[in-house]
Image (cartoon, rainbow, N blue to C red):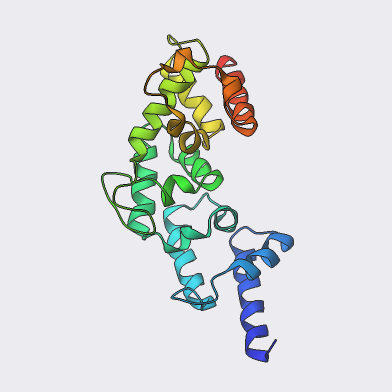
Amino acid sequence: RSSVEEEASEMLYSIWLKHGANEVQASRLVEESPKEGRYASPRRIERKLVRLSRILPACKLAVMALADMRILYQPSSAILATLIELMKWFDADTAMAMMQEEPRLATELRAGGGSGGDYDSGAPTLEAMVLETCEALRGIGGSAAASDAAVFFALSEEPSLIIKLPPLRDSCLSWRSRDIAEFPMDLQNSIAWAMRMKHAT
């Protein structure tokens, strides 16, 4: 590496540490950070992270970036719209924790009817995916009468279900008619965990 590249890597390493990475994560993020385009510069990455930290003060942005580097390319307005939409159902800290764990809520779904970033304007809306996931959990769990509070608590524990579950909807079968065994194992585990937590409330 040239001295310029070394300096850029050291700067990136420091930036990611500042935004919640441990040493191993920071090293990985240095390798995975954009090498071309508007975020090829460490200073540009730092400026974007500073803006995001004002919107998501409770989030470890490095953890979000490890899960989905596209978070850098999302307009700050789209990130804020996702947070505001989640706060229709969850308190601010819970909404931010969900976004940290599952940044695709911001990078793949549209919030507040908006568009932008890397997702297509025809992408599903966050609201539609949340409501569909609630319906799915009630049906699969055989507990259609479960309280909204219990179902939303389950979503807060496993926010990835909002991304993974709705696409598996069967137009011919209700969620209540579905067998959890037909889903991928990792999804079965997430559903089982969410259901256990739901019934614990």
Q: Position of residue 72 (x, y in %)?
A: 46, 63
Q: Assign the N terminus to one quadrant of the image.
A: bottom right
Q: Quadrant of residue 158?
A: top right
Q: Is residue 77 visible?
A: yes
Q: Residue furthest front?
A: 172
Report the residue at 68% width, 60% height from top.
25
35 left or right of 134?
Answer: right
122 left or right of 95?
Answer: left
Between 165 and 10, the one nearer to me in the picture: 165
Query: Number of labelled discs?
Result: 0
Report the residue at 45% width, 67% height from top.
48
Q: Position of residue 77 (x, y in %)?
A: 33, 56
Q: Is residue 197 visible?
A: no
Q: Residue furthest left?
A: 113
Whether residue 150 is situated above or below residue 133 in the rendered picture: above
Between 119 and 196, the one nearer to me in the picture: 119
Q: Position of residue 125 (x, y in %)?
A: 33, 40
Report the residue at 53% width, 42% height from top.
97
124 left or right of 166?
Answer: left
Q: Residue furthest bottom?
A: 3
Q: Position of residue 200 (x, y in %)?
A: 60, 16
Between 105 and 19, the one nearer to me in the picture: 105
Q: Assign the C terminus to one quadrant of the image.
A: top right
Whether residue 103 is situated above or below residue 48 in the rendered picture: above
